[in-house]
Amino acid sequence: MEARVRTVVVWAAAVVVVAVTGAAAGTGRWTVATAVASFAGGVAVALGVLRRGAVARRAEVARLTELVDRRAEQVAALSHELRTPLAMIKGSADLLLEGSPGPLTAAQERFLTVVDHQCTQVIGLCESLLIQAKIEAGIFTPRPERIDVSVVVRDVVTAMRPLSAQRKQRITLDTPQVTRRLPADPMLLAQAVTNLLSNASRFTTVGGNIGVRVTTIDTGVCVYVSDDGAGMDRDQRRRLFQRFATGRPLADGTGLGLVITKTIVELHGGSIMVDTTSMRGTTFLFTLPWEDE
């Protein structure tokens, strides 16, 4: 605001100088009334320009906000339209795999497993798109509770172990028995850890190992998720946390999981980092701060 006021004064002063110069050139006389009138006119012109600029900026902000809201609505509608039939397909596949309608041949079971797995992936993609659209539209905010991060992480690992076992992968867990509680949204935190574990499982070889660790530091809690997969080179590392860029070769992901994880961590006032070397695995770690005293 001070900068704008200075601009107005300079502009008005310039108008006065022009008026004085013109008066001197024309009549050789210049009065105080002429100067005051010129200064007032210059201020009025400058303020008019500023007002028009402010109105234009408000209109542009309103237009962009409307576009973001419209995009969020479109993504939400598309996500709903996709999830509903996919959920029905997945439910039917699950019933067939359970053998409710009758026994399956080995080939039928194999094909149904593929159908079930692909449905799960696309449903997860729909959820990720919906969350990201809500975050960008500013209509998605954390609902913090005082939670033990170790408990949330243990629950996620327990849920993920059967899926990792399908690829003969082993998840090891190292957490304190009790961790000082901090304010966080438990559902969002579970989503972030799930995304990192899914990412690690995707890029770890069959029969590989995934390590999860929770530690406390001076400023908060740190969560590590490590894999012994192929790792990443510098270019692949640079493309991390970009939508629809997984950062890894031959990847079948969209990169949305890491984008959402980063957003969730930052919404909680934390930060996320990665330590990776080509052919030597990858470690993602994120921090969550203690509550401000």
Image: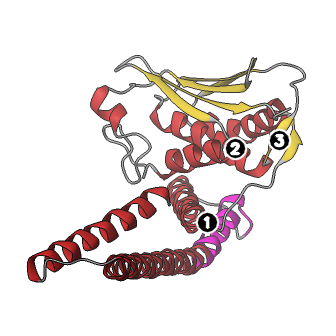
| Disc 2 packing (10 Å; few <14; some 14–19; many ≥20) | some
Tell me residue 229's x, y (percent).
44, 25
Q: Nearer the viewer, residue 86 or 75?
A: 75
Residue 183: numbered disc = 3
Q: Would you name the residue on which mark 2 appears? A: 268
Tell me residue 67's x, y (percent).
46, 79
Q: Is residue 99 magenta?
A: yes
* Mark 3 or mark 2, earlier in chain: 3
Q: Is residue 26 magenta?
A: no
Q: From what the image shows, is residue 66 above or below residue 142?
A: below
Count of labels in the image: 3
Mark 3 residue element: strand
Q: From what the image shows, is residue 14 above or below residue 23?
A: above
Res 212 quadrant in image: top right
Tell me residue 202's x, y (percent).
49, 39
User: Cβ–Cβ below 8 Å for labels 3 and 2?
Assistant: yes
The residue range painted magenta reads 84-100
Res 14 quadrant in image: bottom left
Q: CA distance from mark 1 to mark 2?
A: 15 Å
**Which residue does the image show at 48% across and 52% down from the upper left?**
256
